[in-house]
Image (cartoon, rainbow, N blue to C red):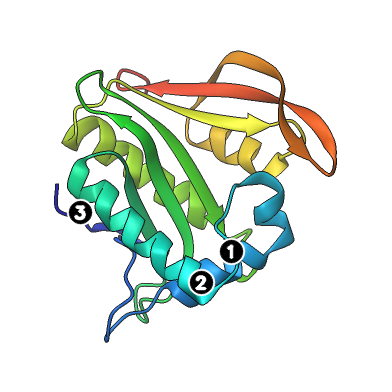
Amino acid sequence: MDPVEINAGSWYLRALRADDRVDDRPAVLASCRDPEIRRWRERPPATQEAAGDYVRLCAQRWRRDEGYTWAVCEPTTGEMLGEIELAALDLAAGTAEATCWALPAARGRGMITTALSAVLRFAFAGLGLRQVTYAVAEGNTASSRVAIKCGFRPTARQHSAWVSDGRRQDVLITARSATDS
């Protein structure tokens, strides 16, 4: 599938880019260096080359229908402030896993909740997905708030599934289906 742009009102979602007009590598690099993002998300090494590789990998995943990644941007400047991804995409089964992050300057403004809600509408109405899961590591209060606001419901718990701050954390698996309101 070709990348799909989404107007989420206060935020604009588009495919990640690194070209002569738009370069998301600085935001990707910032996400790789941010301690809070690194605490909860696997990120590529914090190098310009790795950031470029990551942008290319996201484009490949779009083409292969393996996962869809959106840069969450300020609409007037196009500056990337965060990311939403439908990972582990299985169009035949109608499932995906949602992941997200926000740079420090964009936190606390409802950006991720708004952007993820828009992606979920696209996932269910546009792609025909039946279920999207969202993993929340124990102690990740920001992800817990996003899950609740976006209508995800707890479905399972994976004990000691994540390492944060040098200790193993439980992960709560939440899900939202196409029939949830």
Q: Earlier along the polypeptide chain: callout 3 or callout 1?
A: 3
Q: Amino acid at mark 3?
A: Val
Q: Which residue is mark 2?
A: 27
Q: Earlier along the polypeptide chain: callout 3 or callout 2?
A: 3
Q: Is residue 78 left or right of residue 81?
A: left
Residue drawn 37% across the image and 79% down it: 23
Q: Amino acid at mark 2?
A: Ala
Q: Are marks 3 and 1 in contact (CB under 8 Å)?
A: no
Residue drawn 29% across the image and 61% down it: 15
Say the numbered circle drawn on residue 31: 1
Q: Amino acid at mark 1?
A: Ser
SS under mark 3: loop
Note whether 170 is above or below 6 in the view shown: above
Which residue ends up furthest to the right in the rendered image? 166
> Relative to the observer, which residue lies in front, 24 or 78?
24
Residue at mark 2 to residue at mark 1: CA–CA distance: 6 Å
**Disc 1 residue crowd, few under 14, some 14–19, many 20+, Cα 10 Å:** many
Estimate the x, y position of residue 116 in percent, counting from the top left.
42, 45
Note whether 23 is above or below 3 in the view shown: below
Q: Which residue is mark 3?
A: 4
Query: Which callout, 3 or 2, points to the residue nearer the camera?
Result: 2
